[in-house]
Image: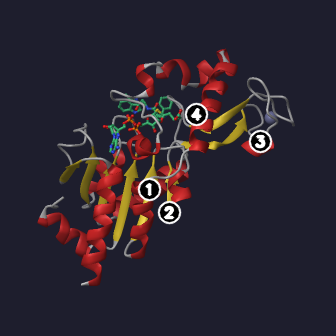
Amino acid sequence: MIFKQEFLDKLKSAKRLVFFTGAGISAESGIATFRGKDGIWNKMKPEELANFNAFMQNPDLVWEWYQHRREIVHKTEPNPGHFAIAGLEKYYDVTVVTQNIDNLHRRAGSKKIYELHGNIERNFCVECKQYYDLSDLDKTEGVPHCKKCGGLIRPDVVWFGEFLPQEELNGGETSAKQSDICFVAGTSAVVYPAAYIPMNAKRAGSYIVEINIEPTDLTNYADYSIFGKSGEIIPLILKEAEKLKSS
Ligand code: BJW
Ligand code: ZN
């Protein structure tokens, strides 16, 4: 792969990198994306499962859906894309701003991570807000109940119509605005307010590099679009950085 010279120049002078990531970065680990031809939501309507009303109407079904996805996440490993992002920390101040709930960036060794849509390992009581790690919960059939107040326990993820965690959103947005290069990897960039982050980064002067297997809503906005699998492209970027930063 030959990268555009303008991008290589940016990579040489850059100090701060942001990786704004979505489901596509975990696709090569075996986790299905939401949209696109193999997306889980071609088979299941998101509004039926990923919103609070759906949970209250059918908590067992929604809980079982998350349990199923947890099993998949526990069986998978970070892929070369996740590891290369962590590897770039040797040369840059790297911040990951992820829409993913799967923990794979952390497991790959990235240190500074903002999770915009929560984390599938955490849960909380809808009544008293008590937090529960998965290990704190007895394995039950269907949705577990709070040990303090008996309320329903839900995954700590952000559903449609819910606010994003303010500190994560602010932290992610600020890092992206301050970055020299903002990579946008494996996201369709259609879910807001997360999708505003790379746009605001560009307005603040960052150089936007998209990595995706196909064009997205962001492609016209990006300074450079690299079409290919993130698990193949990002390791090549790490190799370039190694050369540039040691020369
Ligand atoms: C590869 C690859 C490989 C594959 N290599 N690439 C402004 C305008 C319009 C609508 C709104 C707006 N503001 C708010 C809204 C409403 C709504 C929204 O955005 N709707 C749009 C869909 C139209 N937003 C919200 O409701 C948000 N909350 C909110 O706004 O609060 C304020 C409010 C409060 C009260 C009332 C009203 C408003 C919350 C959004 C929460 C999103 N939650 C989910 C579920 C999380 C939990 C779970 O996982 O179950 O988050 S939805 C789902 O989409 C998930 C993802 O994080 C998110 C983004 O998806 P992502 O990551 O981009 O995945 P895909 O599948 O879409 O794309 C994968 C990409 O990878 C593709 O492009 C592939 O090509 C690519 N790919 N393999 C590289 N190997
Ligand atoms: Zn409770």
Farthest residue, direction left = 5
Location of residue 230 in the rendering, given as x and y in whole percent from the top left corner? 33, 50
Farthest bottom residue?
247
User: Sequence-wise, which precedes: disc 4 or disc 3?
Assistant: 4
Counting residues from the N terminus, which is met first, the one under dot 1 or under dot 3?
Answer: 1
- Position of the N terminus by quadrant: bottom left
Q: Which numbered mark, 1 or 2, is in the foreground of this view?
A: 1
Which of marks 2 and 4 precedes in the sequence?
A: 4
Question: The C terminus is located in which quarter?
Answer: bottom left
Q: Is residue 19 above or below residue 146?
A: below
Q: CA distance from mark 1 to mark 4?
A: 19 Å
Q: CA distance from mark 4 to mark 3?
A: 22 Å
- Determine whether the beta carbon of the residue marked 1 sits less than 8 angstroms from the nearest atom of ligand 1: no
Give the vertical position of 30 relative to 180 (above or below). Answer: above
Q: Which residue is mark 2?
A: 110
Are discs 1 and 2 less than 8 Å apart at CB?
yes
